[in-house]
Image (cartoon, rainbow, N blue to C red):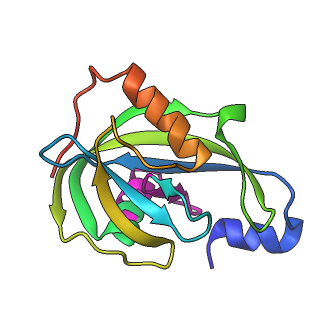
Amino acid sequence: MGYLSELRRIVGNRPLLSAGATILVYNEDHELLLNLRSDTKTWGIPGGGTELGENLQETAARELYEETGLQADHFELLTVLSGQDYYFRYPNGDELYSVIALYSAKHVTGTLRINDGESHELKFFSLDNLPVMESRAAKIVEWIKANQSEKQGGL
């Protein structure tokens, strides 16, 4: 059981503050990897909460592998995102304010596959043709589009 799950047993659905990592993975066509989330039935960007004793880069590596089966030689920290725009209410009523370390995965290897029950599908999308996304992911895409001069990671 993870740290946030343990806290949820104590505080119920009340708002929590959680630090975590979200990882941008691009393919050779500069399409962004998204996961169809099993909890919200919307598309998101791979990532998740930091466990006790874990640094954010370790979170990025763990979450990337758990959610996609991929590994990266390096993670470039792009920015840290937080505030009201990164509040989320899950379908079960849990509330969360996220502090997100946004990374770009570099030199990505592995076979794309779902290693946990958090996703139904993994797929690359053009930034110009994105599906309906979970609200925090949509805000991250807004940040990406505003900062496209940044170098993109790739497989």
Q: How many marks?
A: 0
Q: Is residue 56 magenta?
A: yes
Looking at the picture, how far across and down is residue 57, in whole percent? Answer: 39, 50
Q: Which residue is rendered at x = 48% and y = 54% of the image?
A: 44
- Left/right placement of residue 150 relative to residue 100 reads left
Instruction: Say above or below: 89 vs 87.
Output: below
Q: Is residue 141 magenta?
A: no
Instruction: Say above or below: 22 vs 59.
Output: above
Residue sitting nearer the eye, 16 or 67: 67
Tell me where the magenta segment starts and ends, as one range: 45-62
Instruction: Say above or below: 121 vs 96.
Output: below
Q: What is the quadrant of residue 8 in the picture?
A: bottom right
Asked whether the viewer can see residue 83, the reply is no
Q: Which residue is rendered at x = 81% and y = 63% of the image?
A: 93
Residue sitting nearer the eye, 145 or 51: 145
Looking at the picture, how far across and down is residue 62, in whole percent? Answer: 39, 64
Instruction: Say above or below: 150 vs 31.
Output: above
- Left/right placement of residue 115 relative to residue 48 reads left
